[in-house]
Amino acid sequence: MTDTGSPREKSYRFLLRLRPRVQPYRSSFLWAALLIVVGTVIGLAFPLVVRELLDAAFLAGDRGMLDRIALFLIALFLFQAVVNLGQSYLTASVAERVVADLRKDLFRHLMSQPPGFFARKRVGELSSRLASDAGLVQGILRFGVPELVRQGLFLVGALILVTITHPRLTLVTMIAIPPTVLAGWLLGRRVRRISTGIQDRLAGAVSRAEQVFTQITTVQSFTRERWEAERFRQEVDATRDEGLRRAVARALLTGTVTFTAFGAIVLVLWEGGRLVLEGALTPGTLVAFLLYAVTIAGAVTSLAGFWGNLQEASGAARRIFDLLDEELELAEPRDPTPLPRPVTGRVEYRGVRFRYGEELPDVLREIDLVLEPGETVALVGASGAGKSTLAALLPRFYDVREGAVLLDGVDVRELALAELRSTVGLVPQEPMLFAGTVRENLLYGQPEAGVEALEEASRQAHAHEFISRFPKGFEQEIGERGVTLSAGQRQRMAIARVMLKSPAILILDEASSALDAESERLVQDALERLMEGRTTLVIAHRLSTILRADRILVLDQGEIVADGIHRDLLKESELYARLYHRQFEQALASSGVRSSDVAAAGKR
Ligand code: ADP
């Protein structure tokens, strides 16, 4: 996502794409434009009034005229202040609303992307699109565009007026324009290049910092704090150095532009002063002329500065539109098939083949599988065998490459995503909770559920015990990512959350690390209640689970190599026997189950 200063036609296109987004606020926009024009006209009239004032005072010696003109000027500026106030409010309101819309659209679009999309992107980058890039676009709409119009009008208006007033002096003024524009263009380009570099670098550093914060235990357990700090330091120092380079370029830009502008003013003063001495020019006209020259210089300066801002904002707009343009990777069916009611929860994988990317190997091959309603099927296999992938195809986190996944006989791709996902409940291995209260977290999938349902679900999930011990009960705030809860409590919360949603089908990714015996028992019990009457696909890590399962599927390198119950598989499948001994006996040893139980189970 590096903006390497694309050609300007290309990058302006992205700012122009804001046009339809301004459309709904057209009337505010047009009023603001009108007020800008009025404000500019007043600004342009000012030197002419000053000329009258000075000439009246000095040439005609008319004291009354002087007073009247001074009063008129005060009234004029008061009016201009009101005009500017209104214009400033109107442009702000358009900019705020357009950017708020843009942020909302972007967030909505991003949220509809499947998990694979987020696996490929850096989360820090996405957040900076929402925050700082949108902020840059807002800045250009709020200040940049009005300033461009105002200064453009000032420049054209003042140039016309000075030309009318005194063509010769105008020529003198013009001398300053080419060097100013050249400096603005060259240095402005440099400023912009550096700015983009700084933003990319900073985004990288911030994204790393975010990763460090979320994985702080990993960092600290490996005592990599110093190394991370060093890495961060390097990035920040590099940003600082770039920032200093940008400051030099900006200072050069401002310096050059200011010098040429004031140089021009001195030239005018010198040449004009001569003309006044010769009697060819009134002092009032000279002052008016100078005021115009200052206006022109100011306009040129701010237009030159505007260049850099414009480029910066175009880059930001481009990054936002790039994300908005990314097609949704999972298309909602245009004309979704409704699920036949009542939902029975029959799941079928028919000749499914899947890989994560075109150039990546197949992760699943020829998967044929039926889960009858209410059946519990345990998936076992070595790590990387494709268990999670197989499960992820059901709620359509990814789409199959070949074959189909069917729910009650309907291809999941033909179902409305919302309907599909309300039918499938997910208890992940390491449930994450949001910062907020216990209640908010439990109601996450079912916000309209009543108090009774909430309490019943938490009771069923053995969550009620610990929730009622919280000082504030259901209103207890839990830290971001649920850090104030133990692993077992988080799992019970996750179970209660799915219990409330009451899906016909359940995907269970068992935690691979055992909890302490008591916690384990509570979680197991909660899970059993949850699984009751639901079709369940469980990625099994616990012996009790595979013993209870109606069927066990052994997955090896993306293929189902055995299918049966524990006792048979132990005899028939060498892979299963091996996995079983390695994985479950170890787990048993640590969870304190007597080995005679295992032996008994093995004989079952
Ligand atoms: P399991 O759950 O059995 O441990 P997974 O389904 O997680 O296995 O992974 C199966 C294979 O797919 C692994 O080789 C893994 O590296 C690969 N894989 C998993 N997720 C992704 C992904 N998002 N992008 C690319 N490859 C992936």
Image (cartoon, rainbow, N blue to C red):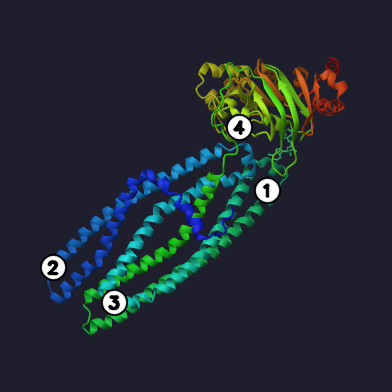
Q: Identify the residue shown where x is 50% and y is 18%.
A: 450
**Residue beneath label 3, please?**
167
Q: Which amino acid, by three-letter code, is at mark 2?
A: Met
User: What's the CA distance linking mark 2 and mark 4?
Assistant: 77 Å
Identify the mark nearer the N-term, 4 or 3: 3
Kindly identify which residue carries mark 1.
Answer: 225
Disc 1 versus disc 2: distance between alpha carbons? 76 Å
Residue behind mark 4: 482
Task: Residue under label 2, please give it.
Answer: 65
Q: Residues within 10 Å of mark 2 (few under 14, many from 20)?
A: some
Identify the residue at image location x=83%, y=14%.
604
Mark 3 Cα within 10 Å, few/some/many (few <14, many 20+)? Answer: some
Q: Earlier in the sequence, mark 2 or mark 4?
A: 2
Q: Which quadrant holds residue 588?
A: top right
Left or right, residue 98 beside residue 82 = right
Task: Name the residue nearer the viewer: 333 or 72.
Answer: 333
Crowd around label 1: few <14 · some 14–19 · many ≥20 (10 Å): some
Q: Marks 4 and 1: which is nearer the front?
A: 4
Sequence order check, earlier mark of 1 and 3: 3
The residues bearing labels 4 and 3 have C-alpha atoms spaced at a distance of: 75 Å
Kindly report which numbered mark, 1 or 2, lies closer to the viewer in this rendering. 2
Report x, y in % for residue 78: 23, 56
Secondary element under disc 4, as helix, strand or loop, is helix
